[in-house]
Amino acid sequence: MSTKVSARFTLLLGVSLVIVFGLVASGSALGGASQSCGTVTLNEQAWAGSTANTYVTKYVLEKRLGCTVKITKITEIPAYQAMADGKVDAVLEDWGYPAQFTQYVAKQKSVVFVGSNGLTGHIGWFIPKYLLKQYPQFKTWRGLKGKEDVFKSAESGSQGMFLGGDPSYQQKDKELIEALGLDFKHVTVGAEPAEVARFSQLIKQRKPVIFYWWTPQYLNAQLNLAEVKLPPRFKNCQDDGSQGGDVKKYRCAYAAAPLKKLFSKEFVQSGSPAVKVLRKFKWSNADQNLVAKWIAGDRMKPDKAAEKWVKANAAKVNAWLK
């Protein structure tokens, strides 16, 4: 082999090796490292538990995968369309909207159900326990009948006041009140912070109050509450009053159910390593309540609360990253 041919071969070999190593390093050949994370958009709902979910996963995606995480604050039902449009990548705590689930997940397949976030959610009617001691019959809805005026307020006039949740939340309390023949006026003061401020003030004054509430919720460890027993569930019992129709189909207690994670189809198909991590993300009611308390109760900045929890729960976080 001549010196000229040898030199040319050496040069070509060197260039080839540079290309191969470059491809391997970039993950585009030989099954190398996964593609970069890019930008992930998470939707934060209007309650402390959702804030906890969102910021804990945000911290993990940013610090462990190098993602850029954006947070939107779209209410529950419009969030389905936002996912379908690719404006939101993931909702990490959906409480269940049958019509939207059918439309976007089952039919359009523009939104993907990826499992539970590990939490069990339950909505109900609650009163303070000091009121139950005074009126033991309030243990069930039947005991409220004829005593609704105990809950009168300036807003409700001669009727009892039922303090409802934010209109964007899943609820059927107006329908239940009608179906049960109770003389309550449904009054809404806003999202979680406004509702908490209102019933907390009444509880502090040891006044009667009945309200829409749920678990998991960090305040439940501090509040001394009793749940009013509603009629038992039956086949095809409905929980989303926004669907309208005969009120009889809502005449039952709210279900207790695993809370859902939903991703946009676009995000699922993106190849982002964040998809795998968020699929595996799950934690307990106690985990969420702790972080929610730090944020909403102790006024810790959400990013700092997330960092504190992640550093104290390495094993759980590592399971999401495997």
Image: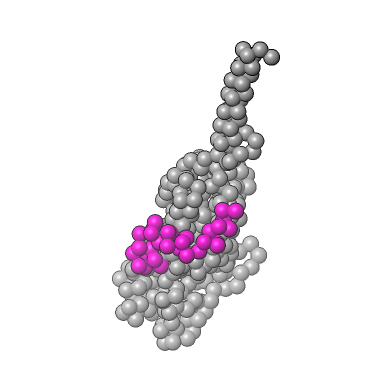
Give x and y (percent) for residue 165: 42, 63
> How many callouts does the rendering have?
0
Q: Give the quarter of the figure containing the N terminus.
A: top right
Question: Which residue is located at x 44 percent, y 44 percent?
Answer: 68
Vertical relation: 171 (above or below) 322? below
Q: Is residue 155 magenta?
A: no
- Give residue 147's quadrant in the image: bottom left
Q: Is residue 110 visible?
A: no
Q: In this orientation, which residue lies closer to the viewer: 22 or 271?
A: 22
Extent of the magenta region = 293-322
Task: Identify the main secondary structure in magenta.
Answer: helix
| Residue at x 38% of width, y 63% of height | 295
Where's residue 23, x and y in %? 58, 32
Residue at the farthest right position: 1
* Residue at the image point whose x is 34% and y is 69% from the top: 198
Q: Nearer the viewer, residue 176 or 122?
A: 122
**Residue 184, above or below 20:** below
Q: Is residue 237 left or right of residue 207?
A: right
Residue 15 higher or lower than 202, as above or below:
above
Left or right: residue 322 compared with residue 304: right
Residue 98: % across, % down: 58, 54
Determine if the magenta segment contains residue 318. yes
Q: Residue at x 64, y 38 (%)?
A: 31
Q: Nearer the viewer, residue 36 or 148?
A: 36
Give residue 167's position: percent from left, percent from top: 43, 58
Display colour scheme:
one colour
**Observer able to see residue 134:** yes
* Residue 33 position by quadrant: top right
